[in-house]
Image: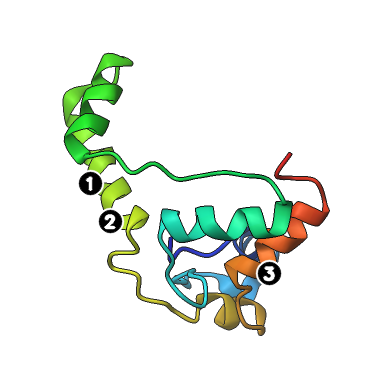
C-alpha cells in the first residue's frame, strides 16, 4: 500500500489538469512509507473506534473466488499478482511525486485515516 492516498492523488490530478507546468511530467505518487493491508486494518480501528480485521487468503483461493465470480482466469491471475504485491507492501518504494507536483510532502496513511474517520467516511 505504498501508493499515495486519495486526497493526494486527487490534488495532483487537479493540478495536472489545470496547470500547464505539469504538461509532459510523470509523477510517482506514493505515501511516505509503504504499508500492508494488515497494517492498514490495524490503523483504521484506532481512528474509527470500530473493529475490523484483515483476513489474508492464499493467492490460489483469491484466483478461485474471482473466477467463480465470472472473472476470466488470466485477469484473475493478473489481479491476484497485483493484490499480493500491494497487499504485502512489496515493491513499496516511496517517491516524491506529490512534493514535486504540489510543493508539499505527501500525507501519511494515519493522517488520511484520522481525517476520513472524523468526516464520517469510514461509516
x%, y% of residue 42?
53, 57
Crowdedness near tag 2: few (<14), some (14–19) or many (≥20) residues, C-alpha within 10 Å: some
Residue 63, picture quadrant: top left
- Element under label 3? helix
Residue at point 42%, 70% (across, down)? 34
Q: According to the image, what is the colour scheme of the structure?
A: rainbow
Q: Is residue 73 above or below residue 58?
A: above
In which quadrant will I find the C terminus? top right
Toward the viewer: 98 or 65?
Answer: 65
In which quadrant will I find the N terminus? bottom left
Residue 75 in view of the camera:
no
Residue 81 - label: 1
Toward the viewer: 73 or 115?
Answer: 115
Q: Is residue 78 above or below residue 43?
A: above
Residue at the extreme right of the image, as rendered: 119
Residue located beneath label 2 in the image:
85
x%, y% of residue 81?
22, 46
Q: Is residue 28 above or below residue 63?
A: below
Residue 62, picture quadrant: top left
| Distance between the alpha carbons at the discs numbered 2 and 3 | 23 Å
Crowdedness near tag 1: few (<14), some (14–19) or many (≥20) residues, C-alpha within 10 Å: some
Would residue 2 be found to the left or right of residue 52 on screen? left
- Residues under numbered marks 2 and 1 in contact, where contact means CB atoms less than 8 Å apart: yes
Residue 90 in view of the camera:
yes
- Element under label 2? helix
In primary-sequence order, the first of circles 3 and 1 is: 1
Residue located beneath label 3 in the image:
111
In primary-sequence order, the first of circles 2 and 3 is: 2
Q: Is residue 29 above or below residue 79?
A: below
Amino acid at each position: 500500500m505504498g501508493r499515495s492516498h486519495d486526497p493526494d492523488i486527487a490534488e495532483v490530478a487537479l493540478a495536472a489538469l489545470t496547470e500547464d507546468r505539469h504538461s509532459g511530467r510523470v509523477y510517482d505518487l506514493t505515501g511516505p512509507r509503504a504499508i500492508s493491508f494488515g497494517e492498514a486494518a490495524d490503523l483504521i480501528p484506532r481512528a474509527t473506534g470500530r473493529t475490523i480485521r484483515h483476513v489474508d487468503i492464499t493467492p490460489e483461493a483469491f484466483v478461485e473466488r474471482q473466477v467463480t465470480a465470472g472473472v476470466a482466469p488470466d485477469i484473475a491471475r493478473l489481479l491476484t499478482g497485483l493484490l499480493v504485491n500491494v497487499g504485502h507492501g512489496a515493491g513499496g518504494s516511496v517517491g516524491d511525486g506529490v512534493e514535486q507536483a504540489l510543493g508539499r510532502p505527501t500525507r501519511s496513511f494515519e493522517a488520511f485515516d484520522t481525517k476520513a474517520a472524523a468526516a464520517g467516511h469510514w461509516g
